[in-house]
Image: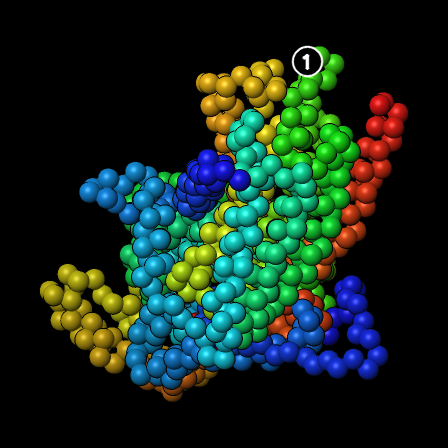
């Protein structure tokens, strides 16, 4: 391991995770508020200003940050202090780790080109449950505990169907490495149709998005939060602890957008342009930008869903996960296998 | 107690289990700070509910005895504070019944008009909040936007958005201001558009229907036994509306339908309210064309204040004004009950007079007090997540239930 490699990796971590993803998560809080306000015919945030500039409320994430850092960190009586402080970290760190295997550009533009790729993502995202359950349990509050239990049950259930959904992708592209999957999506079907995941696995994409949003606890699957009934597993958190939970939620939105873009929208691939990713120069820049665009589009889509539909109930989420998504995922795998056996 | 098929794995024989108790409210975002529900839960299933009201008790009925008959009107604003105009109309109706007077026709039309715009505001709040509690934030804010237009209209008519205090014994504070028709039509346009939008987002939404249908069910017998009225009763299939069954003011001259439900669940309550908004708009449209010209107050200085030029320039006017302000309207000895159809159901006022200008006793029959009795039956056996939508479906208003 040379010094150059270490420095390069650090630069990629800094550039992709800390600058792109974390800042994007902060901006997504603004996007969510502004978008909901447009949908709901409101003005939305527009008060935070720097030197008289308001920039359509774009400074609100900064104001939120300052507020979160300076507010009192309240620990409820009876809470398990160590776990109470550790839980937000348990929620945040796995989410950040998941970005490591996402190829955000051609060639070396990936932090770690693991062969296990997608499996690593599943493994590391599974850790996210700890943040939720520990946070809810350590708060010593019945409401938080209910939220934690809902969250744990939901995440475990949907991980199954989420994992099975992408088996079709693995079968079609013959790899679990995200870099290899993106490379394979550069091929053309019948000489003109880009062989993106969404083209060869349309049902898989829909199921994946549903399962991923449920896994991420976003509306309409936000019952661990359930703001009007149990307020959520982070009900006792204030200041930075709460902000960390929120940040990890928005980061998960980005993770899902990244994974979905990689698996189903060809990652950094621009259709009919340099499928091997060896051109370099401005084409590489364009490919990275196109990946960012896909991620932004999928983030926007997830938010659009959130502000349109109501929330499921606990038993409905469970029956959707086990009785609808799981059989459909299995059917999808079967159909993929049959088609592959016949065609290839 | 409702038997509902809910898929929960049975607890193995001999496993140690214990119900958990959670304390919902009064400091809970959905409880308005005015109700507490102590829930006994088996996992997420509600096993028992203990509902406690009284957090907003202000002694309304006792306060009423301290003022003259007219001085009670502002207090009635604070009963159901989402539709205060209906309370105003109901209270003065009871006093006028005791007085044995009938207000001029124009006044009756205006009172009906005010009741109907208040009813629309009330129903918009109820359906919006119901959607909000199951996570549909957007329709809620659309409903609030439409309600805001109605509040602007109320402010234009009465001078206040919520504390309207518009009616007086024997008439109104003042006639409708110039240009009220245009203001109404502008508000109606927004309301109609928003109702269409809300229906588009909710009525045929699979998640919404799954969350609302067969939840918070109460049968017609139970509903009648508990004393349900209003949309909650009509949702169970009982065709009872004070406006139709005991017509007051000019409701018998107006053409409107009373929607009824079939199952008495949350979805029926939502659908009934949505249809009633449309029917109320229909009534308002008829009033727009039918309303006659003429005075709004009865021509009796013992009941209604004389015009100011009479007070300042004639001895009779001066004396009448003094008598009315200092001693109040002399209401003959006796008692009367008068009910109007409020946003949540039958708002009744029972007034007793000892012959003086001050009420001996004023009692309000709030609709949601009776409906709250049924809440336990509606939520026990269901899921925790259904408690709040059901609670919002009955549209309990703290000011009305605690008085």
Front one among B379 and B265:
B379
Name the residue at 36% across, 48% down: A61
In the rendered view of the protein, which quadrant contains the C terminus of chain B? bottom left
Classify A309 as above or below B170. Answer: above
**What kind of element bears circle 1?**
loop
Classify A161 as above or below A84. Answer: above
Rendering coords of residue B73 (x, y %): 35, 70
Name the residue at 22% across, 65% down: B306
The answer to whether residue A256 is left or right of residue A172 is left
Where does label 1 land, which residue? A192
- Can see residue A92? yes
The residue at the far top in this view is A191
Rendering coords of residue A303 (x, y %): 52, 42
- Can see residue B386? no
**Residue B3 in which image quadrant:** bottom right
Name the residue at 19% across, 42% down: A51
In the rendered view of the protein, which quadrant contains the N terminus of chain B? bottom right
The answer to whether residue A150 is left or right of residue A56 is right
Rendering coords of residue A327 (x, y %): 81, 46
Q: Chain of mark 1?
A: A
Name the residue at 65% across, 21% down: A186
Front one among B334 and A120:
A120
Rendering coords of residue B70 (x, y %): 32, 73
Classify A313 as above or below A85. Answer: above
């Amino acid at each position: 391991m040379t010094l150059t490699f270490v420095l390069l990796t650090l630069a990629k971590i800094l550039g992709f995770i800390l600058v792109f993803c974390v800042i994007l998560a902060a901006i997504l809080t603004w996007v969510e508020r502004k978008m909901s306000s447009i949908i709901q015919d409101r003005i939305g945030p527009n008060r935070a200003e720097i030197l008289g500039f308001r920039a359509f409320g774009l400074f609100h994430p900064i104001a939120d940050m300052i507020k979160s850092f300076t507010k009192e960190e309240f620990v409820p009586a009876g809470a398990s202090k160590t776990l109470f402080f550790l839980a937000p970290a348990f929620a945040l760190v796995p989410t950040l780790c998941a970005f490591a295997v996402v190829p955000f550009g051609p060639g070396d533009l990936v932090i770690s080109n693991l062969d296990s790729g997608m499996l690593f993502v599943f493994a590391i995202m599974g850790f996210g449950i700890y943040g939720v359950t520990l946070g809810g349990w350590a708060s010593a509050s019945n409401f938080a505990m209910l939220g934690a239990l809902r969250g744990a049950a939901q995440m475990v259930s949907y991980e199954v169907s989420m994992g099975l959904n992408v088996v079709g992708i693995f079968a079609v592209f013959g790899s679990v490495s995200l870099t290899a999957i993106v490379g394979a999506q550069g091929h053309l079907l019948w000489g003109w149709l880009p062989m993106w995941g969404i083209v060869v696995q349309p049902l898989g994409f829909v199921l994946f998005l549903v399962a991923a949003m449920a896994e991420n606890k976003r509306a309409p699957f936000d019952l661990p939060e359930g703001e009007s009934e149990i307020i959520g597993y982070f009900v006792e958190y204030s200041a930075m602890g709460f902000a960390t939970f929120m940040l990890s939620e928005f980061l998960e939105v980005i993770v899902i957008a990244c994974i979905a873009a990689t698996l189903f929208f060809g990652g950094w691939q621009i259709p009919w342009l340099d499928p091997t990713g060896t051109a370099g120069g401005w084409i590489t820049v364009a490919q990275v930008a196109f990946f960012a665009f896909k991620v932004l589009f999928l983030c926007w889509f997830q938010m659009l869903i959130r502000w349109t539909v109501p929330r499921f109930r606990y038993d409905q989420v469970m029956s959707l996960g086990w009785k609808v998504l799981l059989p459909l995922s299995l059917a999808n795998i079967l159909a993929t296998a049959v088609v592959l056996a016949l065609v290839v | 107690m409702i038997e509902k098929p809910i898929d929960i794995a049975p607890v193995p024989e001999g496993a140690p289990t214990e119900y958990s108790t959670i304390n919902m409210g009064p400091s809970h975002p959905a409880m308005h700070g005015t109700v507490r529900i102590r829930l006994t839960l088996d996992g997420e299933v509600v096993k028992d509910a203990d509902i406690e009201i009284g957090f907003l008790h202000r002694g309304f009925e006792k306060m009423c005895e301290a003022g003259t008959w007219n001085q009670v009107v502002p207090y009635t604003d604070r009963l159901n504070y989402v539709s205060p105009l209906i309370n105003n109309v109901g209270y003065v109706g009871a006093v006028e019944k005791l007085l044995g007077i009938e207000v001029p026709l124009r006044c009756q039309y205006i009172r009906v008009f005010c009741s109907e715009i208040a009813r629309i505001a009330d129903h918009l709040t109820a359906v919006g909040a119901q959607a909000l509690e199951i996570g549909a934030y957007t329709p809620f804010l659309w409903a609030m936007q439409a309600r805001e237009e109605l509040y602007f209209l109320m402010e234009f008519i009465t001078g206040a958005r919520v504390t309207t205090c518009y009616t007086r014994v024997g008439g109104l504070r003042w006639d409708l201001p110039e240009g009220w028709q245009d203001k109404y039509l502008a508000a109606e346009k927004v309301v109609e558009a928003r109702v269409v939008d809300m229906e588009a987002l909710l009525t045929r939404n699979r998640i919404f229907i799954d969350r609302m249908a067969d939840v918070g069910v109460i049968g017609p017998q139970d509903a009648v036994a508990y004393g349900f009225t209003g949309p909650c009763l009509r949702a169970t299939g009982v065709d009872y509306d004070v406006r139709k069954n005991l017509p007051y003011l000019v409701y018998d001259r107006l053409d409107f339908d009373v929607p009824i439900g079939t199952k008495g669940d949350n979805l029926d309550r939502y659908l009934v309210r949505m249809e009633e908004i449309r029917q109320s708009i229909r009534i308002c449209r008829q009033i727009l064309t039918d309303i006659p010209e003429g005075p709004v107050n009865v021509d009796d200085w013992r009941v209604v204040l004389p015009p100011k030029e009479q007070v300042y320039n004639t001895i009779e006017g001066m004396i009448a004004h003094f008598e009315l302000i200092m001693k109040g309207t002399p209401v003959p000895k006796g008692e009367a009950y008068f009910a109007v159809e409020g946003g949540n159901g039958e708002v009744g006022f029972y007034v007793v007079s000892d012959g003086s200008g001050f009420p001996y006793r004023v009692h309000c029959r709030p609709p949601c007090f009776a409906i709250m009795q049924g809440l336990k039956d509606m939520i026990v056996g269901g899921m925790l997540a259904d408690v709040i939508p059901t609670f919002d479906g009955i549209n309990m208003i703290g000011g009305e239930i605690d008085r």
